[in-house]
Amino acid sequence: MEFKIKSGDIAKAKTPCLILGVYDKRKLCAAGDAVDKASDGALSALLKKGDMTGQKAGCLVAYDVAGIAAERVLLLGLGKPKEFDRGAFDKALAAALKRLSEIRVTDALLALPEPPAGMDLYRTVRHAAMQAAHANYRYQQTKELAKDAPPLLRGLSFWVEGKAEQAVAARAAAHAKAIGEGVALTRELGNLPGNICTPGYLAKQARALGKRFDALSVEILEEADMEALGMRALLSVSRGSREPAKLIVMHYNGAPKRKDPGKPIVLVGKGLTFDAGGISIKPSEAMDEMKYDMAGGASVFGAVLAACEMALPIDLIGVVPSSENLPDGAANKPGDIIKSMSGQTIEILNTDAEGRLILCDALTYVERFDPAVVVDMATLTGACIVGLGRHPSGLFTPDDKLAAEISEAADAAADRVWRLPLWDDYQQQLDSNFADMANIGGRDGGAITAAAFLSRYTKKYPWAHLDIAGTAWVTGKEKGATGRPVPLLSELLIRRAGVDT
């Protein structure tokens, strides 16, 4: 999808569809007033007929408006000016995109209204472009689109005034395009079935990215390599599968010319391409959704792609431990004790708590990079969904400064998080009579004890954990991957890179 920035006399702008905002009580936005004047009051006359009052997300399409170059005008309800915030903007954009699809428009020009409350021009353009890119995604690898399916929106332009505004809007659109591509890749990997998207498939996708970008190098560690490193926690999960585990390492060197490139930022994502629970097998209902259990790993792919596309001046390493978790004669059994790469022993009380087993070895592995910060993300616990629902991702870190940094980036990217405690009080729930720790901490505070488990492997660097179990996919009839938390990760990387927004 292409994004362009336009300016000049909006009445002379040639486009299949010009989108103009209308506030409550039929008040046109500034660009709408200019078009209305050029058309000798045609828009005002149309609004007076009562088909639209400016109510939130209302849409009215007008054809062949005299005095302007646009083929049609889509009047878009924004609601009351005092209530026009990001939420209202979201609803209006969604309505406009849906209407464009219904009337089979493939290219449009959006005359931006005043930025919503709490947003500037950069945020407004980026947010609108991101939403358009998200709405444009279609899964097609194993299902063809219907022959009568509406065409995709191929291009969306933004009308702004002034050279300074054009530069800001162009930067926002470029970032949105890059992040949108990262989100789309993450959604595609998450939506693929487990018989296609295996650990080996993820490794191939990583190599393909490495060939695409000169600044990206890729290393794939095989099971023999992991055995030599002592990554027996990770390998204990893959023993129950015929698909060999992979440890995928993607190194983006975007700061080769900086005098002090600094320590690398490391992203670690759980890459369970299918999770049946192992011996502690899951109920059959909705087990098909366990193909999404690699959403954390998929989001690492998406964030790395976005960083490459934006050419961010940072040193970034993405690490994806990938396996399947299936029942087999060689699979983990409740009561088994394994030794992790760190040397700590783990008693397996539930084989369905496998994500933390593959992550703990990956978190130990990344010590060698002397990272500035490590952020891991995983569809780790159903308990996080029970506690927070599906709106924010759970954030865990012992570092208050890092928590604030991630929370601010999340709010800016409209990809929210909520911090949960990580007090030492919870560590005792992981006590074991036979090992250094158990892999579960009981029913109480399940998301917290999972994070507490991971924290035992992250003492040598600043670290945060994102539990994305409730945010990485939509369940039910409209099920599918969301691409979160790629917007948050991308925003965090942009800020760490010091790139203007």
Image: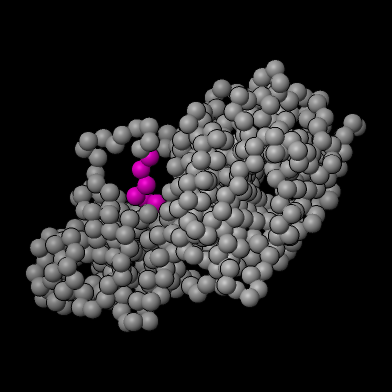
Identify the residue shown where x is 32% and y is 63%. 3
Query: Percent from the top left, x then y, of residue 306?
Result: 49, 57
Compared with residue 325, is residue 381 higher up or lower down, i.e. above or below?
below
Q: Residue furthest right?
A: 433
Which segment did they paint magenta? 134-139
Q: Nearer the viewer, residue 438 or 103?
A: 438
Q: Main secondary structure of the magenta part?
A: loop
Left or right: 329 as drawn, with respect to 158: right
Q: Nearer the viewer, residue 120 or 220?
A: 220
Identify the residue shown where x is 73% and y is 25%. 332
Query: Percent from the top left, x then y, of residue 155?
Result: 28, 58
In magenta stretch: residue 140: no
Query: Percent from the top left, x then y, of residue 48?
Result: 17, 66
Left or right: 387 as drawn, with respect to 453: left
Query: Percent from the top left, x then y, of residue 166?
Result: 35, 76
Left or right: 218 as drawn, with respect to 64: right
Give the image quarter of residue 460.
bottom right
